Image: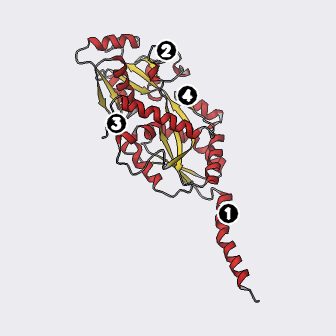
């Protein structure tokens, strides 16, 4: 059979292009991965794990969760930023990684707002200001401020390290009230809460996820939450805004990113999958049980939301004098 050169070339080009069209139309064609840049068990981890099964069902592929902790999330984020921009590896990150880490780590080789694009928001997690009533017998934020002004050496407040939400909120509380307060770093919520329960640290802006049961049992006392509205799980505790501190209207929220160069069709497929899974009532109910809230931002508003909210956290970090590590 005689084949002319034009037919051969046309056939060769079609064969070369076929895999590209197939991959675009059949994405995902293999298992996907979500990198959690923190240790297992924390909110960044459990939130995405709540979505894992329904997301996998929607995408008709296995979704693997990989924890790559270190450097306030930078190790995991850098691994995703430097990896293939094909949609198969995603990052579940926090607003602090977007708005605070650039201040703490100016030598980072990636820019979280330029090298990533956000494909979905997942949840927000208010913090709650807690004290131990056996050692710090105050019943309101106003009483705490008065107590701090009379306590020799001022208050101590627990953090999860420089730039963590308890650190930023504790420093902001100090700035807005004019009290003296010394940050004490710990490796996470559990050891920090243990120190408050033991009376060795005065206060902690803890995630509701870890402190709600301690509050309900009376081991610690919740004075105020940092969310714009009261939290259903702790409905009797006022917001910081209600007690006179509107500057605490800061929600700690989570989102999913992929490298900026990820193809538009792949991004659209992932956005549709996350929109469907995040909107499920079972996810919202599971979050509520843990003191978190579902966060859904329409995709046409997503970019502006991420930039605006990240800039808010950056401004607060600058206001409290956060410096590079």
Q: Which residue matches tag 1?
A: 22
Q: Residue furthest left?
A: 152
Residue appearing at x 46%, y 31% in the figure: 312
Q: Nearer the viewer, mark 1 or mark 4?
A: 1
Q: Which residue matches tag 3?
A: 187
Q: Which mark is residue 242?
A: 2
Per the image, label 4 sits on a secondary structure element best described as helix
Is residue 189 at least partly visible in the picture?
Answer: no
User: CA–CA distance between discs 2 and 3?
Assistant: 31 Å
User: CA–CA distance between discs 1 and 2?
Assistant: 55 Å
Task: Check contact, mark 3 vs mark 4: CB within 8 A.
Answer: no
Is residue 150 at least partly visible in the picture?
Answer: yes
User: CA–CA distance between discs 3 and 4?
Assistant: 24 Å
Q: Nearer the viewer, mark 1 or mark 3?
A: 1
Determine whether, in the image, residue 76 is placed left or right of residue 300: left
Say few, some or many: other residues with alpha carbon within 10 Å of mark 2 (under 14 / 14 to 19 / 20 or more). some
User: CA–CA distance between discs 1 and 4?
Assistant: 42 Å
């Amino acid at each position: 059979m005689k084949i002319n050169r034009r037919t051969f070339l046309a056939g060769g080009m079609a064969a070369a292009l076929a895999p590209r069209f197939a991959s675009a139309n059949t994405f995902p064609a293999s298992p996907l991965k979500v990198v959690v840049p923190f240790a297992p068990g924390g909110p960044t981890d459990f939130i995405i794990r709540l979505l894992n099964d329904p997301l996998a069902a929607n995408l008709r592929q296995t979704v693997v969760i990989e924890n790559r902790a270190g450097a306030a999330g930078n190790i995991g984020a850098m691994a995703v930023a430097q990896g293939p921009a094909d949609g198969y590896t995603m990052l579940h990150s926090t607003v602090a990684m977007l708005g605070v880490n650039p201040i703490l780590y100016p030598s980072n080789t990636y820019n979280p707002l330029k090298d990533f694009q956000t494909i979905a928001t997942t949840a927000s997690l208010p913090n709650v200001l807690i004290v131990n009533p056996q050692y710090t017998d105050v019943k309101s934020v106003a009483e705490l401020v008065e107590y701090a002004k009379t306590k020799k050496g001022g208050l101590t407040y627990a953090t999860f390290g420089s730039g963590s939400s308890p650190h930023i909120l504790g420093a902001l509380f100090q700035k807005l009230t004019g009290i003296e307060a010394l940050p004490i770093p710990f490796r996470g919520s559990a050891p920090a809460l243990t120190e408050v329960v033991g009376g060795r640290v005065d206060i902690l802006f803890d995630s509701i996820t870890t402190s709600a049961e301690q509050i309900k049992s009376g081991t610690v006392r919740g004075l105020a939450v940092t969310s714009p509205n009261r939290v259903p799980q702790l409905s009797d505790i006022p917001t910081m805004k209600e007690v006179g501190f509107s500057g605490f209207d800061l929600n700690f929220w989570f989102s999913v990113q992929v490298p900026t160069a990820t193809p538009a069709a792949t991004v659209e497929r992932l956005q549709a999958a996350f929109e469907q899974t995040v909107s499920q009532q079972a996810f919202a109910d599971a979050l509520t049980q843990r003191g978190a809230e579902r966060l859904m931002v329409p995709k046409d508003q997503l970019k502006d939301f991420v930039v605006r909210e990240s800039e808010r956290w950056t401004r607060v970090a600058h206001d409290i004098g956060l410096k590079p590590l």
